């Protein structure tokens, strides 16, 4: 083995892990000692061990941004092209993240351990959230003149997504309930994440149903409504624990406060989905055999708008609570949870725009445009800090990622 004094002169006296001493010429220090010796440089292969599922928060946020650009009420020439570029960049980022995740498990193993880890495992659903943004982006950017094969592809992708995300919600929570112990005093909104992907089935349905054939649209909307309700109900039950934790133990540590924005997402995406699915129902749809399909459609739309406005207010309340918490005590070190300040707020902004379009309100649409600018600015801010954190070894480093327990 190479002389550790030459490799890490300042850490020669520190204890080494022995698990890889036979396969690597570079000594590996434990996370606690690395935190005290942050100047120690690691090879990319070593840092890849700490490339976690939370990296998909980057792609879910970028995909959400592409969807937000495509949904803008106040448009200008070239906006669609900008959104398409963002969508393609997201596809490239997704391919890169998937490649690096595969490299991590090939080189270092630990796939099952990552999925069952009490902290990192909760971020596995962000992979499926990224998939959801890509499916909706397909419709937004390539669905203007869909061929029958294109519509059928979206339909198949929707049903595969529903099956996979329902399985995630069932099996991940089943594992958590039987094998992991969390204290309610430490409850964080990330506990909601396993239910988030199945909830976005409704959001996908709201985007793709309108241009689907009638025979396919009604089952898609029905499934979207069902799974949207399931995801939101699980989230709502988690909210009671979250509010109880805030009342008993106060706000989370400043470094975890960006994650509070996760609670903004479920009611916002549910409002967006309800209105979108009501609009996506075919004109021939009737309620309980009614012959007045036009009146049925108006009734469903009114109910969706009422529920949407109700849920938007809940999302806005969570947004204000999280915003004030972060402003009062901003985080000092970058964590991938910072992307929670982008994706859930994208859903909140989309819900605002959808309500503005439905009420034909220029004022609400103006607010939606203003929020869109804020979301874009936040994406740029988090992305720049994300890149800096990688370069400075603030993430992908022992003891600094989601692969350690709180």
Image (cartoon, rainbow, N blue to C red):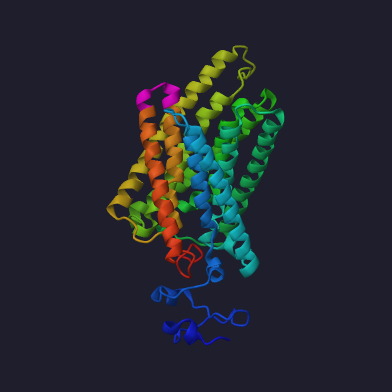
Residue 193: image location, x then y, percent: 51, 50
The image quarter containing residue 139 is: top right
User: Is 215 one of the magenta-colored residues?
Assistant: no
Camera sees residue 48: yes
Q: Residue furthest right?
A: 149
Q: Is residue 324 above or below residue 201?
A: below
Tell me residue 186's x, y (percent).
41, 59
Q: Residue furthest top?
A: 292
Residue lying farthest front?
78
Quadrant where the C terminus is found in the figure:
bottom left
Q: Residue at x 62, y 63 (%)?
A: 103
Task: Please tell me whether the stretch drawn in magenta is mainly helix, strand or loop.
Answer: helix
Residue at 48 percent of width and 85 percent of height: 6
**Residue 296 % position (x, y):** 56, 17
* Image quadrant where residue 268 sits: top left
Q: Is residue 264 above or below residue 275?
A: below
Q: Position of residue 336 (x, y in %)?
A: 45, 56
Task: Please determine whether, in this image, residue 159 is positioned above or below residue 122.
Answer: above
Is residue 225 among the parts visible in the rendering? Answer: no
Magenta residues (range) = 356-364
Nearer to me, 205 or 130: 130
Q: Nearer the viewer, residue 211 or 380?
A: 380
């Amino acid at each position: 083995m190479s002389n550790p004094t030459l490799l890490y002169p300042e850490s020669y006296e520190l204890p080494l892990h022995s698990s890889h001493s036979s396969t690597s010429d570079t000594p590996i220090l434990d996370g606690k000692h690395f935190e005290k010796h942050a100047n120690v440089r690691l090879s990319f292969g070593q840092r890849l061990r700490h490339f976690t599922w939370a990296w998909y928060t980057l792609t879910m946020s970028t995909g959400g941004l592409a969807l937000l650009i495509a949904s803008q009420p106040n448009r200008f020439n070239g906006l669609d092209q900008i959104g398409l570029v963002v969508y393609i960049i997201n596809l490239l980022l997704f391919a890169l993240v998937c490649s690096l995740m595969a490299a991590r498990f090939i080189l270092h193993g630990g796939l099952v351990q990552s999925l069952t880890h009490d902290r990192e495992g909760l971020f596995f659903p962000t992979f499926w959230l990224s998939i959801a943004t890509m499916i909706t982006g397909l419709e937004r950017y390539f669905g203007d003149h869909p061929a029958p094969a294109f519509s059928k592809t979206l339909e198949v992708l929707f049903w595969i997504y529903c099956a996979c995300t329902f399985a995630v919600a069932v099996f991940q929570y089943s594992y958590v309930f039987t094998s992991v112990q969390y204290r309610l005093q430490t409850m964080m909104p990330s506990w909601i994440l396993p239910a988030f992907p199945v909830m976005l089935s409704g959001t996908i349905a709201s985007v793709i149903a309108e241009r689907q054939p009638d025979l396919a649209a009604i089952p898609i909307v029905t499934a979207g409504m069902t799974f949207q309700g399931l995801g939101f109900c699980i989230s709502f039950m988690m909210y009671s624990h979250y509010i109880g934790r805030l009342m008993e133990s106060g706000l989370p540590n400043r470094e975890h406060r960006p994650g509070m924005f996760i609670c903004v997402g479920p009611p916002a995406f549910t409002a967006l989905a309800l209105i979108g699915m009501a609009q996506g129902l075919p004109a021939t749809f009737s309620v309980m055999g009614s012959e007045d399909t036009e009146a049925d459609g108006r009734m469903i739309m009114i109910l969706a708008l009422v529920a949407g406005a109700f849920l938007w207010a809940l999302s806005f309340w969570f947004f204000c609570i999280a915003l004030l918490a972060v402003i009062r005590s901003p985080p000092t070190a970058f964590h991938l949870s910072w992307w929670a300040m982008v994706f859930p707020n994208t859903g909140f902004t989309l819900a605002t725009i959808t309500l503005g379009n439905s009420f034909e309100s220029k004022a609400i649409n103006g607010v939606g445009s203003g929020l869109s600018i804020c979301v874009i600015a936040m994406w740029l801010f988090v992305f720049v800090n994300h890149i800096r954190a990688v370069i400075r070894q603030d993430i992908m480093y022992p003891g600094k990622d989601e692969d350690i327990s709180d």
